[in-house]
Image (cartoon, rainbow, N blue to C red):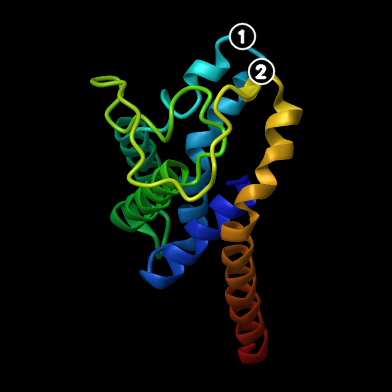
Amino acid sequence: MTPVGHAAVGYLLGRSRGLVPLVGVVGALAPDVDFVMLWHPAFNTWHRVVTHNLVFVGAVALLVGIALARRPGVGFARAAASALLGGLSHLLVDACLDGNASNGLGIAPLWPFDATMWSPWNLVEPRDGGPGWRDPWAALAGAWRTAVWELPVITAASLVWWRSRRSTTIAS
């Protein structure tokens, strides 16, 4: 899933649970921070391992919770829960929509304790033996296969956001 799709899922989950939607977006985007290392030769073996696990998502949630603990209307618990829910959604989505299985299918949720890749089911046909992230442009060109799953979520998040902005403007 693209960053826009992950952000949409994090936003919708945050809104539906009465949490902080924008913090859910941060949590949902955090596991892909490893893309700063995209051009490193070992990136293909790191991606969906080092930052796509429960330890990383928990650490991000803890740090976000601490950073926003004194923010009025947010607090530690709501901020941490929002980031955690967003991060967990990222893990589940990537485990189920892996079209670039060049480092194994799914994610490694228990890394660093266990590097076993996990995918409860995969909704897109993976390209085994494809270029992986060694050729980022080819990998991104194959991302269109997840659009059938991603576009409805992005559309729903856009509508919910637009309605919330509109109702805030009308109430003012």
Q: Is residue 27 above or below residue 163?
A: above
Q: Secondary structure at mark 1?
A: loop
Q: Of all residues shown, which one is farthest toward the top?
A: 41
The image shows a total of numbered marks equal to 2
Q: Residue 134's mark? A: 2
Which quadrant of the structure image shows residue 168? bottom right
Task: Give percent across and percent down for residue 30.
Answer: 49, 39
Residue at image coords 42%, 35%: 106
| Mark 1 burial class by Cα count in 10 Å: few <14, some 14-19, many 20+ | few
Q: Residue 73's mark? A: none
Residue type (three-letter) at the residue carrying disc 1: Pro
Q: Of all residues shown, which one is farthest toward the left?
A: 113
| Quadrant for the C terminus in the image | bottom right
Q: Is residue 133 left or right of residue 88?
A: right
Q: Secondary structure at mark 2?
A: helix
Say which of 108 and 74 sits in front. Answer: 108
Say which of 33 and 101 sits in front. Answer: 101
Tell me whether the residue at label 2 lies in contact with that at label 1, contact meaning CB atoms closer than 8 angstroms: no
Task: Give percent across and percent down for residue 67.
Answer: 41, 42
Residue at image coords 58%, 79%: 164
Task: Give percent across and percent down for residue 151.
Answer: 64, 62
| Mark 2 burial class by Cα count in 10 Å: few <14, some 14-19, many 20+ | some
Task: Give percent across and percent down for residue 65.
Answer: 35, 46
Residue type (three-letter) at the residue carrying disc 2: Arg
Q: Is residue 9 left or right of residue 161?
A: left
Residue at image coords 59%, 58%: 150
Q: Which residue is mark 1?
A: 41
The mark nearer the N terminus, 2 or 1, is: 1
Q: Is residue 157 left or right of residue 19?
A: right
Q: CA distance from mark 2 to mark 1?
A: 7 Å
Question: Nearer the viewer's eye, disc 2 or disc 1?
Answer: 2
